[in-house]
Amino acid sequence: MIRYLFNILKTTPYMRLLTKIALLITLCSFLNVNGQDNLKIRNNNSGDIIAFGTFSGILDFGNGTVLGEISSEDEGYFLSSFDSTGVLNWVKHLKGESQRCSGMCPGIGLTIDFNNNILITGNYWDHIEFDSVNTLRNTGRAESFVSKYDEDGNFLWMLHGSSPGISHGIEIDTDSEGNIYASGDFSGKGPFTLDSTIFLPAEESLESAYISRITSTGNVEWMQRIHGPGPDNRAGVNIQSHATDSSGNSYLTGYYGGSEGVRISFG
């Protein structure tokens, strides 16, 4: 059925758009989508389709490529590339435990830079394997990551985000110079660190949001924080969506809550 659908799409002037929709429907039938934004799809400059998401059990790509185990409740992430007709170029299995939550789980982020490099962000419990060599491990709580792959799916680098509570990587984007802007949220009475060198100070908000700028080589240049006023009138702040324009200006949306009349601070 899928092969027949793609043959039809080849004859239409809207092949690329319709192929993306067909691919999305096909992928969603395999995914463990719990809450929000657990699947992201983007096009690169070559017309390939990049998909990044979480899954449980078995993920079958229909060409003999199968990831996961049927008895597993959380297989971590997959990162894959398809050509414009839906043929699989490659797929990576980022093994680990991606989500330990119920209801509205945190989202994940995917973007492509002007050189077709792939940037992803998300969170993990216990560990996550970016390839056969590079693995992150934590101490039993949710921690965030930012990672970069080239167009062919080769691992380039990763960053680790950590706080005394939990942290989530939620959105990611790039500007015209290849700088990376990653956003998410964190909690806990202590600093949030990304790459262990840049940190945001401790604050007794229920949850704070952050946005960071990272160079194309993985160096963190700065981070800014959105947070509540402190222990007497605490607020929780969460990122929902984030986009960056070609000049490096970032635009974020989200929500916050707490005591009646609570206000939040930016920066």
Image (tube, helix red, strand yellow):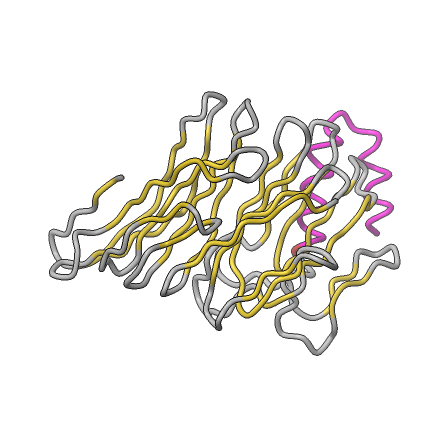
Q: Position of residue 265 (x, y in %)?
A: 21, 43
Question: Which residue occupies the foreground of this view, 65 or 217?
Answer: 217
Whole-percent x, y for residue 158 in the image: 59, 49
User: Is residue 12 found inside the magenta-colored segment of the image?
Assistant: yes
Task: Give the camera-side residue of 74 and 180.
Answer: 180
Left/right placement of residue 40 relative to residue 87 reads: left
Instruction: Indicate left or right for 205 with 68 as reference.
Output: left
Which of the 4 image quarters holds residue 98?
bottom right
Q: Residue furthest bottom?
A: 71
Q: Quadrant of residue 62?
A: bottom right
Counting from the top left corner in percent of width and height, residue 79 is at 69, 50
Tell me the chief SS of the magenta region. Answer: helix
Residue depicted at 54% across the width and 49% down the height? 159
Which image quadrant for residue 249?
Answer: top left
Number of numbered tags placed on the structure image: 0
Give the camera-side residue of 226 and 155: 155
Where is residue 208 drawn, in percent x and y?
A: 31, 53
Q: Residue at x 77, y 40 (%)?
A: 152
Q: Is residue 43 above or below residue 185?
A: above
Q: Is residue 209 left or right of residue 63?
A: left
Quadrant location, the C terminus:
top left
Residue 135, compared with residue 194, is above or below; it is below
Between 142 and 60, which is closer to the camera in this rendering?
142
**Residue 9 lies in the magenta stretch:** yes
Please report the residue visible at 46 percent of the width from the left and 57 percent of the height from the top.
Answer: 106
- The residue sitting at 45% across, 51% down in the picture is 196
Q: Which residues are magenta?
A: 1-27
Q: Is residue 193 above or below residue 182?
A: below
